[in-house]
Amino acid sequence: MGDLMIWLMRHGEIDLACKGKLIGQKDVPLSRKGRNQALSFRNLAKEAAIGSVFCSDLSRSYQTARLISEDLNIPVSQVRALREISLGEWEGKLVKDIKECYPDQWRDRGENIAEYRPPSGESFTDLASRVIPAFESIVASTKSNTLIVGHAGVNRAIICHALGIHLQNVLQIGQDYGSMNVIQSRGGVLKVESVNCSGIF
């Protein structure tokens, strides 16, 4: 394994109709602001000498990756394992409604965020069990600086892994729409350089 920089981005903002809802794996597009957030990283991608681009197969992730990489002449590789956490029966529902209708389950989730599974959904431990092997495979197989466009949960799981901290801390890691994280891989050893940076830096 050589030395490379991994630019780990959360996709841009999604349609405002989703505001206040748990989205999970529902496939929703970028908003206009989300597209502009992606475009704002085009120059950075060139300056960072990005040589490979990966994203999930959900449209908000793929759209972000395509907008950033259009001028790089690099194919975008979609990786299903990088999909956002599945929230099962809670997907598409307003957070306030879930809190009101399922107060005990919402409390249990908050107390054990690493292991709690919504009905028919995934826990963050389940998420990490598919995301981390995919991430490690990308790092091991690429020799150039790499852009990965993920999701809030996906990126948080990767950052927890890179920092060596427990998934119970996952929600303490900020991941705004269109934000960028930078992880250095030196001989396979990961070092988190920055977290949740927005705009050009």
Image (cartoon, rainbow, N blue to C red):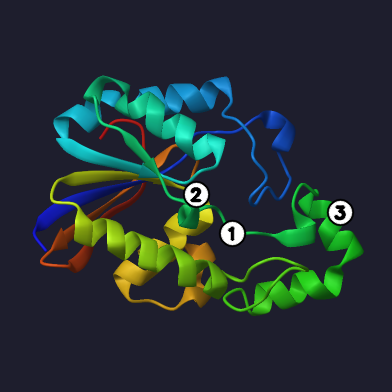
Residue 125 in percent (x, y) is at: 53, 75
Q: Amino acid at mark 3?
A: Asp
Local secondary structure at mark 1 = loop
Residue type for callout 1? Ile
Q: Which residue is mark 1?
A: 85
The residue tagged 3 is 97
Residue 174 in view = no
Instruction: Name the side, left or right, on which 158 lies relative to 201.
Output: right
Residue in the image at 56% along x and 29% along y: 30
Q: Which mark is residue 123?
A: none
Tag 1 and tag 3, C-beta contact below 8 Å: no
Q: Pointer 2: residues within 10 angstroms few (<14), some, or many (20+)?
A: many
Kindly identify the residue that appears in the image at 64 percent across and 40 percent down. 27
Q: Gap in Å between the C-alphas at discs 1 and 3?
A: 20 Å
Q: Nearer the viewer, mark 2 or mark 3?
A: 2
Residue 122: x and y in percent read 64, 68
Residue drawn at (38%, 76%) of the image: 165
Question: Which image quadrant is residue 191 in?
Answer: bottom left
Q: Is residue 182 left or right of residue 29?
A: left
* Between discs 2 and 3, the one toward the N terminus: 3
Front residue of 125 and 176: 125
User: Helix or strand or loop: what does disc 2 sit on?
Assistant: loop
Q: Amino acid at mark 2?
A: His
Q: Which mark is residue 151?
A: 2
